[in-house]
Image (tube, helix red, strand yellow):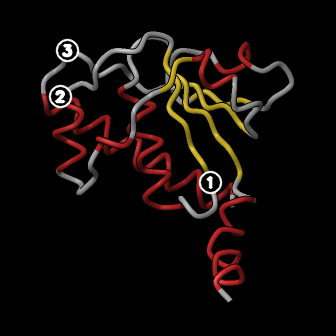
Amino acid sequence: DAKKKAEVLVTPYLHRKRIFFVCRGDACRCQMASAFIQLYAGDKIEAKAVAGVLEEADPLMVKVMEEKGIDMAFHDPQSIKEAVCYGAPDLIISMGCDEGHSLFPGVESEEWPVPDPIGKPIETMRRIRDEIEKKVKVFIRKWI
């Protein structure tokens, strides 16, 4: 009985589509995008934040995501090397750095031209957060 209940709970997650959100340097934009995917479609899409240079999460980004009720403590980015260990995703979305196509040749990629908010005032971070959230909602409607 417990095995059947576990299957019912786990099975939908086994067939999720996989997306890598990629940023060349910081992971701020890809962390936000993957967090919004998890919030709105985590049962249908598995999203990973992938960054070329791993640094600590930007405190301003953490703050503006908290304003949306999202705790970024569990949205750590992975290095490109770590992400490759998971195998090819179904889609790569590059967050303003045109990096997706080179990671996995043959895997579909998109470019979301989102400005880098690092070092900008909190109003800019909020504007970019809201832009990413809108893009994610549109993406989910067309991709699922």
Does label 2 or label 1 sit earlier along the sequence?
1
Q: Nearer the viewer, residue 5 or 16?
A: 5
- Residue 90 in the image, given as x and y percentages of width and height: 76, 40
Mark 3 vs 1, N-terminal side: 1
Q: Which residue is mark 1?
A: 45
Nearest to the eye among marks 3 and 1: give it: 1
Residue at image coords 64%, 83%: 2
As displayed, is residue 19 above or below residue 46?
above
Given contact means CB atoms under 8 Å apart, are the residues at marks 3 and 2 in contact?
no
What element does badge 3 sit on? loop
**Three-letter residue code for mark 3:** Gly
Mark 2 residue element:
helix
Crowding at label 3, few (<14), some or many (≥20) Cα neighbours within 10 Å?
A: few
Q: Position of residue 19 (x, y in %)?
A: 64, 40
Check the image and report above or below for 77 versus 144. above
Mark seen at residue 59 = 2
